[in-house]
Amino acid sequence: MKSESRLHARDYISRLAASGHYHFSSAEAQAALGVSADAAKLALNRLAKQGLIASPARSFYVIVPPEYSSLGCLPADQFIPALMKRLGQSYYMGLLSAAQYHGAAHHRPQESQVMVAKSRRPIVCGTVRVAFVVRKDIAQIPVQSFNTPRGTVLVSTPEATAVDLVGYYNHVGGLDHVATILGELADNLDAGKLVAAVQAAPVPWAQRLGYLLERVEAGERAQALKAYVRKHARQATALLPTVNAKDAERDEGWKLDINADVEAEL
């Protein structure tokens, strides 16, 4: 009886993969196998021990094709869209993960970074790591779709990525690293779209972003941003929020107190 159950479970995931579906829920597997919840769980556990499937989230499974057997899971961008759809939550690949999509690969991130509207626990699936970062007003963030081997994934645009990198600098290794990535992203940034992207962020993010773009010799991308700052920045702010800005030199163009030395690794 056990081998029959296992055979049915293997047939089930084989049919799914053959039809291009690499994600399923425990309830869907139970219904397809026609067994009890406990029997379905046992069958899925056997497949997981064989490395044929993995479970990045409770009751959510992915089929692991041979090319990803060393990962023990699908890459994050191949299952996050399906997982978030099942959860009914908005998301986009952001920060270092988004920068990679846009050609900035100075440092390969050790984990995928996914922006979400509500806090979620990180995912560990085989060697795949996913960190979730809460982004307010997520529906207003400009995103674009990229193809993956299992469908499509939403990624912040180059401009929105630049804004997020500055706003969440502590998630990406600090301002030096932010400046490095901005230098790599600069050619992909559109000045007008940059202004549109900062409107979904606090004004100090725009002030810091413009200054850093000038630091990496991409000041021409920031000219429209400077006009936005002049209009909307009501007071000066610190380049590094966590450090005292008293007696710091002020950049009047960006209304920014320069309380940190930023060096890009270019």
Image (cartoon, helix red, strand yellow):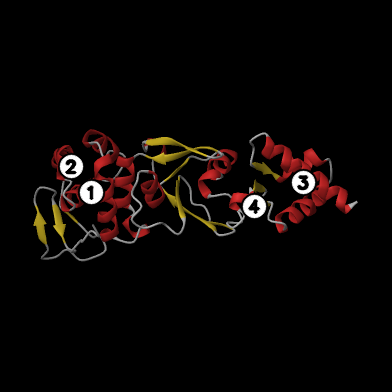
- 35 sits to left or right of 49: right
Q: Give the spatial CA distance, label 1 vs label 2.
A: 8 Å
Counting the numbered discs, the total is 4
Compare residues 14 and 54 and report the one nearer the observer: 14
Residue wearing tag 4: 55
Does dot 2 land on a helix, a strand or a loop? Answer: helix
Query: Could you say which disc has been placed on residue 209 in the image?
Result: 1
Residue wearing tag 2: 222
Q: Residues within 10 Å of mark 2 (few under 14, many from 20)?
A: many
Q: Give the spatial CA distance, label 4 vs label 2.
A: 44 Å
Residue visible at 55% across and 60% down in the picture:
127
What's under tag 4, amino acid-wise?
Answer: Ser
Answer above or below: position of 169 versus 92.
below
Q: Give the spatial CA distance, label 4 vs label 1.
A: 39 Å
Q: Residue furthest front?
A: 67
Residue visible at 73% across and 37% down in the picture:
15
Tell me residue 230's x, y (percent).
13, 41
Tell me residue 77's x, y (percent).
50, 45
Residue wearing tag 3: 10
Tell me residue 104's x, y (percent).
33, 49
Quadrant that contains the C terminus: bottom left
Which tag, 4 or 1, sits closer to the chain's start?
A: 4
